[in-house]
């Protein structure tokens, strides 16, 4: 399971010109589900997302987590993160989970996140979305919990 996290001062997702998810300061995370991912990978990714220290402390060092700063969390499904891009001029998607499994694991991740953090927001699975954000830093990290649990 892949999470492309961006520290943001604000972010929102629109579907058909309607805002369906919005946060102030916090993390926007694009989420990709790979073949072989299970609830265990989703749980490990969530642990990393809420505990990853990407927010500045009083000395300006990235020592604080989303939990520490009580920031917002906007989870956006994005199957293209699982693309195979190492050769050719067109991405392949053989590593991406099938849509039903992807939706189930994304929904599981959201449910678990809502059990740990107030105000979790989401994008729309399978929808054509417009994602707007103000990246704070910029700070962007690619986190991956490979099927089978290795990070």
Image: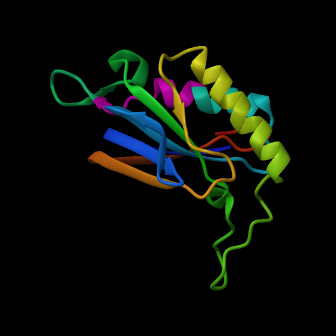
Q: Is residue 100 left or right of residue 122?
A: right
Residue 44 vs 30, above or below: the answer is above
Residue most toward the left?
A: 59
Quadrant of the rendering where the C terminus is positioned: top right
Residue 108 vs 10, above or below: the answer is above
Q: Choose top left, top right, bottom left or bottom right for residue 101.
A: top right
Q: Position of residue 112 (x, y in %)?
A: 65, 21
Instruction: Looking at the picture, tell me which residue is in the foreground, 38 or 129.
Output: 129
Query: Magenta part of the protein: which range?
Result: 47-55
Instruction: Looking at the picture, tell me which residue is in the foreground, 146 or 21.
Output: 21
Q: Position of residue 78 (x, y in %)?
A: 62, 53
Q: Is residue 16 left or right of residue 80?
A: left
Q: Residue at x 62, y 85 (%)?
A: 89
Residue most toward the front?
A: 17
Q: Is residue 31 left or right of residue 107?
A: left
Image color mode: rainbow
Question: Would you say residue 64 is visible in this rendering?
Answer: yes
Q: Residue at x 75, y 36 (%)?
A: 105
Q: Position of residue 94 (x, y in %)?
A: 80, 65
Q: Residue at x 48, y 16 (%)?
A: 118
Q: Choose top left, top right, bottom left or bottom right for residue 8.
A: top left
């Amino acid at each position: 399971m892949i999470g492309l996290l961006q520290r943001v001062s604000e972010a929102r997702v629109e579907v058909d010109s309607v805002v369906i998810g919005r946060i102030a300061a916090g993390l926007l995370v694009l989420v990709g589900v790979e073949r072989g991912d299970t609830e265990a990978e989703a749980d490990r990714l969530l642990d990393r997302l809420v505990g990853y220290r990407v927010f500045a402390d009083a000395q300006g060092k990235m020592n604080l987590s989303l939990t520490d700063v009580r920031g917002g969390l906007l989870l956006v499904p994005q199957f293209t993160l699982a693309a195979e891009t190492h050769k050719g001029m067109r991405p392949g998607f053989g590593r991406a989970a099938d849509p039903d499994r992807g939706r189930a694991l994304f929904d599981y991740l959201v449910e678990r996140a809502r059990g740990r953090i107030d105000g979790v927001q989401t994008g729309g699975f399978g929808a054509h979305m417009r994602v707007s954000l103000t990246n704070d830093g910029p700070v962007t990290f690619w986190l991956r919990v490979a099927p089978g649990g290795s990070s």
